């Protein structure tokens, strides 16, 4: 008798659960069908789709061109090339002046002043690039680099002047017109890929591949400028407003240091490996990092595309704002986990398949480094949140903490465990900067809760 009652209760429970599931599925279907008619959703979907398409093509080009170049150069020459890119990347962050996110925000808030804002940001970036070239000229003689490596550094750093035309990209981002930006980047990608293929077939020397890095920045700048003028827009480069320049620099200076620190703890491992172990080990480590970071475009594209929408969501109320952030964080975390899990098991095969057997040692490095993606995927939208809340100083502080931890760990782990130690240092520093830091700042309590739920309770976020 009691067994019959229990059985009925269990059957009744599962019947209720199935009924609830059916109701939820129906509700989700209704929401999806509603979104098809939502113009705002369709606008942002198309915007994101173009950016995803461009990055997908970049991934394909990477599989067939960038990895082919790495195979051709071999671990040692590829190590020199990677070290050069890592060294100059630290200074390219300075030339950007931290204006990227701020410009999108200002152009969304003051669309009628787009020409003045673009012109002011453009000339600030030009000045920043010239200052960076001067700083590199002073620093390079004190490095342990040979003459050839220093020449490579100067070739790449001279291209930073053309980086100033990125302000046009900010304008199109603020207008949710990623299609225009994506087309320009696809043109640059095709040209760059064709040149690299020719250089490999012609068995060119390393210096020509270095020139391609500068060529890429130049072609993208030219394509941006042409498209902007075809839109019959004003000549922004004729504009400059001192008061706007002051306001931009006032908001951006923490982001300048933050971008430097970001680059340091993303690239300092390659520089330290070169100094402690040599170019060959830089090549091995860089091959794993190159493959691990190929997925970092996903959070950048989604966050960049949705940034204007997130800013507008804040005007609809705090609850709506936090819900949007919660959904974004959860999506980011589990996309990263879905990427990292299979790659961990096929890392060796993937490295040999793409780079060749000479890079086999990079397999274990990849299986460790790929898990840093979880915290990178969290960190990108988190940075957008800090920017929208005018908490740029916190962005700098958490990034600085991550960089310091990365350098300290590299100092001890690289001599002990080689390139594996550098991968572990990156994973730990990303974890600290993008999650642990929130425990120590009361202003980030809500963010800590959102991140924790995204990782441990994703079913409760939608």
Image (spheres, grey):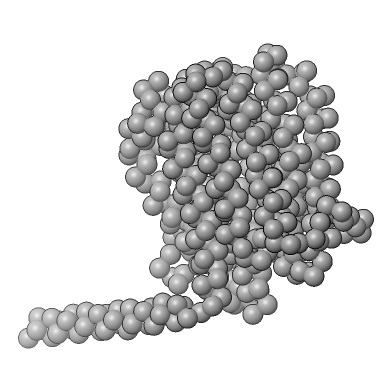
- Relative depth, front residue between 297 and 64: 64
- Relative depth, front residue between 247 and 387: 247
In screen coordinates, is 313 left or right of 287?
A: right
Q: Residue at x 79, y 34 (%)?
A: 132
Q: Residue at x 56, y 39 (%)?
A: 191
In the rendered image, the vertical position of residue 402 relative to residue 355, given as above or below = below
In the rendered image, the vertical position of residue 158 relative to residue 241, given as above or below = above
- Percent coordinates x, y for residue 27 in the rendering: 38, 82
- Relative depth, front residue between 25 and 52: 52
Q: Is residue 285 visible?
A: no
Based on the displayed image, in which of its 4 quarters is residue 425 positioned?
top right
In screen coordinates, is 236 left or right of 56?
A: right
In screen coordinates, is 338 left or right of 205?
A: left
- Relative depth, front residue between 8 and 313: 313
Q: Is residue 179 visible?
A: yes
Based on the displayed image, in which of its 4 quarters is residue 4 positioned?
bottom left
Q: Quadrant of the C terminus?
A: bottom left
Q: Quadrant of the N terminus?
A: bottom left
Q: Residue at x 52, y 25 (%)?
A: 199
- Percent coordinates x, y for residue 50 in the rendering: 52, 58
Based on the displayed image, in which of its 4 quarters is residue 134 positioned?
top right
- Percent coordinates x, y for residue 245 in the rendering: 87, 55
């Amino acid at each position: 008798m009691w067994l019959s009652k229990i059985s009925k209760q269990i059957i009744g429970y599962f019947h209720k659960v199935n009924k609830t599931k059916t109701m939820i599925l129906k509700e989700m279907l209704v929401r999806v069908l509603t979104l098809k008619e939502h113009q705002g959703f369709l606008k942002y979907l198309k915007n994101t789709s173009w950016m995803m398409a461009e990055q997908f093509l970049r991934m394909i080009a990477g599989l067939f061109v960038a990895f082919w170049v790495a195979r051709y150069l071999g671990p040692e020459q590829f190590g020199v090339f990677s070290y050069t890119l890592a060294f100059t990347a630290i200074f390219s962050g300075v030339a950007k002046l931290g204006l990227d996110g701020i410009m999108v925000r200002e152009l969304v808030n003051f669309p009628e002043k787009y020409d003045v804002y673009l012109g002011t940001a453009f000339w600030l970036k030009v000045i920043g690039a010239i200052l960076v070239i001067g700083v590199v000229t002073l620093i390079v003689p004190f490095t342990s680099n040979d003459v050839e490596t220093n020449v490579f550094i100067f070739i790449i750093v001279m291209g930073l002047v053309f980086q100033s035309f990125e302000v046009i990209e900010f304008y199109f981002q603020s207008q949710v017109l990623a299609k225009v930006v994506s087309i320009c980047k696809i043109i640059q990608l095709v040209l760059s890929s064709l040149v690299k293929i020719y250089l490999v077939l012609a068995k060119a020397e390393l210096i020509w591949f270095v020139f391609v890095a500068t060529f890429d920045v130049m072609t993208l700048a030219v394509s941006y400028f042409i498209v902007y003028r075809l839109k019959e827009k004003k000549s922004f480069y004729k504009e400059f407003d001192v008061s706007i320049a002051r306001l931009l620099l006032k908001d951006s200076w923490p982001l300048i240091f933050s971008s430097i620190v970001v680059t340091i703890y993303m690239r300092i491992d390659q520089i330290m490996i070169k100094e402690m172990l040599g170019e060959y080990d830089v090549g091995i480590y860089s091959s794993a990092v190159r493959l691990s970071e190929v997925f970092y475009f996903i959070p950048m594209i989604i966050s960049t595309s949705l940034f204007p929408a997130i800013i507008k969501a804040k005007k609809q109320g705090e609850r709506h704002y936090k819900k949007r952030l919660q959904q974004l964080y959860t999506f980011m975390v589990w996309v990263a986990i879905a990427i990292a899990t299979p790659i961990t098991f096929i890392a060796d095969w993937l490295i040999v398949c793409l780079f060749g057997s000479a890079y086999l040692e990079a397999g274990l490095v990849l299986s460790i480094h790929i898990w840093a993606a979880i915290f990178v995927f969290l960190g990108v939208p988190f940075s957008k949140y800090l920017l929208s809340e005018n908490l740029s100083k916190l962005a700098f502080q958490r990034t600085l903490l991550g960089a310091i931890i990365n350098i300290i760990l590299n100092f001890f782990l690289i001599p002990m465990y080689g390139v594996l130690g550098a991968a572990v240092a990156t994973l730990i520093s990303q974890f600290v900067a993008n999650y642990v830091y929130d425990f120590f700042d009361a202003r980030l309590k809500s963010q800590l809760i959102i991140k924790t739920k995204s990782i441990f309770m994703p079913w409760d976020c939608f």
